[in-house]
Amino acid sequence: MSFMQIKDLNVHYPIRGGFFNTVVDHVYAVDGVTMEFEKGKTYGLVGESGSGKSTTGKAIIGLEKITSGSVIYEGEDVTNKRRNRNSSFNRDIQMIFQDSTSAMNPRKRIQDVLAEPIRNFMNLSPKEEKKRMIELLEIVGMSEEALLKYPHEFSGGQKQRLGIARAVACNPKMIIADEPVSALDLSVQAQVLNFMKDIQTEFGLSYLFISHDLGVVRHMCDHISIMYKGRFVEQGTQKDIYTNPQHVYTNRLLSAIPKIEPTTRAQRKEERRAVEIAYRADAEKYYDQDGKVYPLKDFSPTHKVAMMTSERGEN
Ligand SMILES: Nc1ncnc2c1ncn2[C@@H]1O[C@H](COP(=O)(O)OP(=O)(O)OP(=O)(O)O)[C@@H](O)[C@H]1O
């Protein structure tokens, strides 16, 4: 049973231009994304730079405004309540970034950084609070001495561990991890990933794991969604994606994992063209509410535009 469902999520940024600086078009950063999450599972979100992965993560947690669509958490529509201070969603769904310490105040000691979520969401006495902080440091394999240090005094891997300590402070159900290891050396990447797996088993956490690296995702994820230009072009279990990829874009990402021979510029251009054609072929289909598929070419141009705009909630 899934505890959270994302339904037809759209995040469109207006592009302004012209003499009156009016809205001339939109960037469809996230364009009709639907997914659901089960307890204890890891969901991978993969795609190239600019495909909309971070925007999807931020939109789910409430750091980005949603144009249309909904977030249902434990049976309740929380789309407009995601950042409410006292909502259980705000406590239960946490996010970590590529550089966790960028989200920490550099002038605050680790004890103040860790105290923040505890004070926001838990009602503890100062003594209990300190105990909880030491417990958190233990979970991420660090000692009490860290409490008096500042974020810049730690290595990249340690900083990510501190970011995770803060994220797990109030026993969340899910962590959205946006490129959590991309800035780390390979050996440190493995340490942090294994550690993320350990705390997942211990606390029954779910992850939405955002990465451009299919190699890392293979190590981590049960279920994978491949994103291209704001849409999912393919979704499946880890096994489906790695043994039987369907979309040419997935193939391209997969072939980029071990770079044995460098491809030529012409080969890359050919690949990009194939991906573009496959993507357009998918965009040319119209899915009605019952999931029936119609080729868009069967409709008149005006009808087509009307359908696309009503689909995007622009009416
Ligand atoms: N505030 C904004 N205003 C306008 N366009 C934006 C804004 N934020 C993101 N975009 C655009 O939305 C698209 C998706 O961006 P996003 O950062 O989600 O991609 P990504 O897949 O996470 O890439 P990366 O791995 O490089 O972070 C991009 O085309 C980006 O230029």
Image: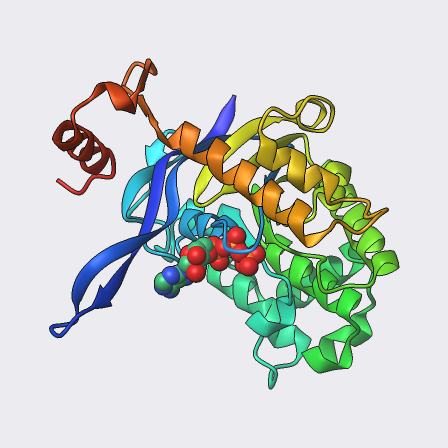
Q: Residue at x 68, y 59 (%)?
A: 165
Ligand 1 positioned in quadrant: bottom left
From this view, report whether residue 211 is shown above or below residue 187: above
Q: Position of residue 139 (x, y in %)?
A: 77, 54
Q: Position of residue 219 (x, y in %)?
A: 77, 39
| Residue sitting at the far bottom | 107
Q: Quadrant of residue 281?
A: top left
Q: Quadrant of residue 9?
A: top left
| Residue sitting at the far front | 266
Q: Residue at x 53, y 62 (%)?
A: 117
Res. 185 in view: yes
Q: Position of residue 130 (x, y in %)?
A: 67, 68
Q: Quadrant of residue 31?
A: top left
Drawn side of residue 238 relative to residue 141, left or right: left
Q: Report the number of discs.
A: 0
Can you say which quadrant of the picture contains the C terminus?
top left
Q: Residue at x 75, y 62 (%)?
A: 137
Drawn side of residue 290 relative to residue 259, left or right: left
